[in-house]
Image (cartoon, rainbow, N blue to C red):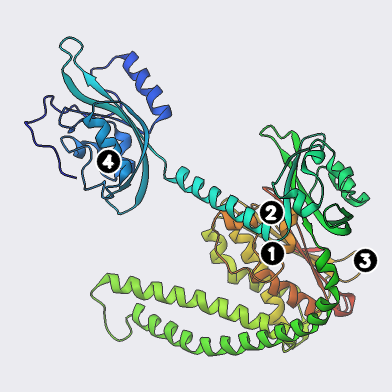
Amino acid sequence: MAKKAGTAPSRPPRTTGDVPAQAGEAARQYEDFIRSVVDWVWEVDPHLNYVFVSKGIARVFGVPAETLLGSYLFSLTYFKQVDEALLAIVEAVEDRVAFRDRAVALEDVNGTYRVLLLSGVPVFDPESGRYQGYRGTGIEATERRRGEAELAALGAAVEDLTELASAWCWQADAELRITQLSEDFAEHAGQAREDSLGRRFDELWRLDESARELIAAREDFRGHRSAWTHTELDEERRFVIGGRPVFDERGAFSGYRGIGVDVSGLLGAEQGVLTAKEAAEQESRAKSEFLANMSHELRTPLNAIIGFSDAMRSQTLGKMTNKRYLQYAEDIHLSAHHVLDIVNQILDLSRIEAGQFDLEEEPLDLAELLESCRRMIQAEIEKAELELAIEVEKELPRILADPAKLKQVFLNLLANAVKFTPPGGRIDVIARLAPAGGLEIETTDTGMGMSARDIPTVLTRFGRSEDAELQGLGGAGLGLSITKSLVELHGGTLSIVSRKGKGTRATVHLPGDRVGGKDGSEPWKILF
């Protein structure tokens, strides 16, 4: 967009900042009020050249505020997308009228796309009435607009899915009375929409006792079956109802919202599902074998990449003069190791599922094995600024197990604890004879924890907790699944107890037939 021709600005640029140097306390208070509602303020002369801009603009434009003084308000350096929204603001300025919260697109100096909300009012000399320029504010609304778009897309997706699934959405108040029903409720549920509003959903939809108990406890209820006569079809239909409690910002219960699905046709196909189950299991075994074969194929080139990148970063064949190449070699080496770890995990999981994972058992000292694990992970413990304590009962018998597989179990558990525990936290490992027989080893951390409903998820293949996804924590979601499988190969069990913000306790229990004779007399041995 071309800058308007004209003489030099009628007012010299002021020093940038949130408050002019000569301003008094009242002006500073005013600027504080402005800062609490907008990201920056600006002022331009009659030719739309900046004469003042607050420092907050630097975070959005990517340049110091003072570099913008004297430049054009709608410079194409930043406003590269000349669309209707930007032209509408230009038109308002040309007509010298106020504009408010006009959304425009901007690209900062780093090439980052941003959405801004601009507001401005024309300024006139109070005595002569002569036009002097504009004053206004700016707000970055990139995340807000992205969230609005995602919410709209989510709403459309929910509507599409409920329509395709012969389902309806509903909402109820704190007294469990239905307040909202989707438009196609009558078509899917076979009940008049107007007759259903205001009625208790648990009574109207004949929920069973187990669902009523969950509702009374203000908990989720899922997959609860019910049946009633569909008025339009004049036949009994079967439905699945689910709901989740809703709480306001103060934590007070405000009702339920959920979904209902007509599953009459599905029940008729149950026999077909059972028939298909065997085929699915066979397909799963074939998939596991395929993954195992592919993993073997991938490991060979990955090992070559790791070897060559290691030679490059250690400059075995000659010194590299360009430090950037050295960093590239380091990045390649680390990335290849990461991919190889994932490939190895997939290979392990595939072999376990294919029944090709044999144990090489021998009597072993659990204290020595845990001490070996501590040494292997000590660098990560120190890097994460954590404290690790391992306690093993002194009279603990030797156990019969595969040392490599059991070491993998505890290294996986310790690695998880390190990943999800913030600096200053603590990890405790305690090994002892179980009161009911056998041996139990507890790994407890003071980390971020997770909700109870996430625990079954993290124990499945590629399963990750909701908080791990939201915080972008790395990992393929295979570690705990492999750990659980390795423990079960030893005839044991892996159980997890966790609370959000309180930490996690993972307990490995090995059966009594893997525990040998006792020796030693001291009750406890402190390893670290």
The label number, if any, that marks residue 458 in the structure image = 1
Query: As drawn, is 433 to the left or to the right of 70?
Result: right
Q: CA distance from mark 2 to mark 4?
A: 50 Å
Amino acid type at image mark 1: Val
Q: From the viewer's perspective, is the residue at label 4 or at label 1 nearer? A: 4
Q: CA distance from mark 4 to mark 1?
A: 51 Å
- Give the mark, 1 or 3, whose residue is nearer the N terminus: 3
**Label 1 CA crowd tier, 10 Å (few <14, some 14–19, many 20+):** many
Q: CA distance from mark 1 to mark 3?
A: 27 Å
Q: In the rendered image, which quarter is residue 167 located in?
A: bottom right
Reading the image, the residue beneath label 4 is 87
Amino acid type at image mark 3: Ala
The answer to whether the residue labelled 2 contacts the one labelled 3, judged by CB atoms less than 8 Å apart, is: no
Residue 104: give x, y in percent of width and height. Answer: 34, 42
The answer to whether the residue labelled 2 contacts the one labelled 1, judged by CB atoms less than 8 Å apart, is: yes
Q: Is residue 111 above or below residue 483?
A: above
**Which residue sits at x=29%, y=48%?**
108
The answer to whether the residue labelled 2 contacts the one labelled 4, judged by CB atoms less than 8 Å apart, is: no
- Give the mark, 3 or 4, whose residue is nearer the N terminus: 4
Q: Secondary structure at mark 2?
A: loop
Instruction: Give the residue furthest to the left.
Output: 7
Q: CA distance from mark 2 to mark 1?
A: 10 Å
Q: Quadrant of the N terminus?
A: top left
Instruction: Give the residue furthest to the top.
Output: 127
Q: Secondary structure at mark 3?
A: loop
